[in-house]
Amino acid sequence: MFRALAALCLACALALPAQARIPFSKEEITLSFAPLVKEATPAVVNIYAKRIVETRSSPFANDPIFSEFFRNFAPSRPRVQNSLGSGVILSDDGYVVSNYHVVGQADEIKVVLNDRREFDATVLLSDPQADLAILKLEGAQDMPHLELRDSDTVEVGELVLAIGNPFGVGQTVSSGIVSGLARSGTATGNERGYFIQTDAPINPGNSGGALIDINGDLIGVNTSILSRSGGSNGIGFAIPASLVAQVLDQAEAGNDRFQRPWAGITGQSVDADMAAHFGLDRPEGIAITQMHPASPFADAGFQPGDVILAVDGMPVSSPPEMIFRMTVAGLGNAVWVTRLRDGREREIEVTLAPPPEDPPRDPVTTGQASALPGMRLITVNPAVIAENQLPQDARGAMIDDPGAIGARAGLQRGDVIQAVNDTVVDGAPMAEVALTRANVFLQLTVLRDGRSLSLRFRL
């Protein structure tokens, strides 16, 4: 019986494929990520950021009713907020990338390298929408740094390492694979982003750290996790290195804020019902629903009802994905956009540019003679539309600050005043004049969240 069992085990062993075998050499036994880690970790840094905020201690702070009435009752006191995160050195002269939520509003930043050297740092450019910030280390030279890899070459299943400072315990390395690409449904910063998904653990403090491939190249900057408890559950997200490269280029060029190409269109993802209508065999692309007259897509011949299928040959299935493709192509460049109209596809060249400041914003603050004094208004133009996610057909004067009286009247920042007492306004100066002329009654037509509201007040 024992001889038969041994023979069966031997036969099974001989039947195993060549890959399923025990290691035979010392090199195979000691195979590890250690050489890669030694090469990459010097370029990943710990970031300590401080921010001074004014706080008020009120005896009514926890009261649901009186907390608002006595919000400014107590004297303000400065309080220090500390944040801890990670960063990645991108050049030998000390340019560092991190997350906006780590350093974006800091008053003092200290960067500590793996070899315990410390540098003061300043934020050159930050972008809350992308949740990215570029720092410059003071007096840095000959710094270890990582090379950026084109994110479009990354594939699901690749081995990756996440390097950072989770929970402040010190520099830590975790391994995993790329578990998904083109993730655009997770919110970060002020808008939905576009991410590389990984199962490498990304915990608090890992934000701003490196996600590298097996060659030691940076493929992404760790930014968030998907978790109900706050712990890592195997779904982490990294901002693609191609977007990091564009932010770095603008920082090196001296920009103090990140500029994206302006599409000037509003669209929605094509679903199954829409796909049948457009003659597609599967849901794909973005259907254009609105278009600004000054949009570069309008100049290229696009119109509402067209479907955008791809940008530079890369399929797009959501507005964030299309904006990402345009952003990584870079301002001033042109992209080839695949358009579907009347069942026929055509590639059309679109030149990328920032939203124009035309007409000028003409900021004004209403005076004491106004029906709503102390309100700050700006004229709506393409740049204002892009910055505040307004509808493409928005016109009039946007409320930048409602002021005390305007706030009590229910007005909010981002509201667009389109008419005052039935007089259509085309910008901030005209709105100010109309508000000054109002007496007895004030009627406002306001655009809020895409809806038109009519507000009436007795003065």
Image (cartoon, helix red, strand yellow):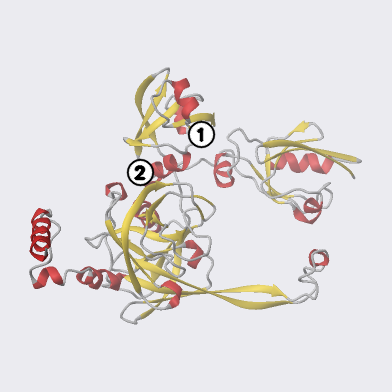
Residue 382 locus on image (x, y percent): 55, 39
Say which residue appears at 35% left-offset and 40% top-offset: 333
Residue 222 locus on image (x, y percent): 40, 61
Say which residue appears at 80% left-offset and 42% top-offset: 435
Quick check: can you spot residue 353? no
- Tell me if 153 is positioned left or right of 56 in this view: left
Q: CA distance from mark 1 to mark 2?
A: 22 Å
In the picture, the disc for residue 78 is none
Q: Amino acid at mark 2?
A: Ala
Please name whichever residue, 159 or 287, is drawn nearer the observer in this view of the structure: 159
Q: Is residue 379 above or below residue 16?
A: above
Please name whichever residue, 247 or 35, is drawn nearer the observer in this view of the structure: 35
Q: Quadrant of residue 177?
A: bottom left
Q: Quadrant of residue 2?
A: bottom left
- Tell me if 123 is positioned left or right of 366 in this view: left
Residue 44 locus on image (x, y percent): 33, 70
Q: Which residue is mark 1?
A: 268
- Tell me if 373 is positioned left or right of 244 in this view: right
Residue at far top of view: 342
Residue at far front of view: 1
Q: Quadrant of residue 35?
A: bottom left
Total labels drawn = 2
In the picture, the disc for residue 329 is 2
Mark 2 closeness class: few <14, some 14–19, many ≥20 residues within 10 Å: some
Q: Is residue 147 above or below residue 304?
A: below
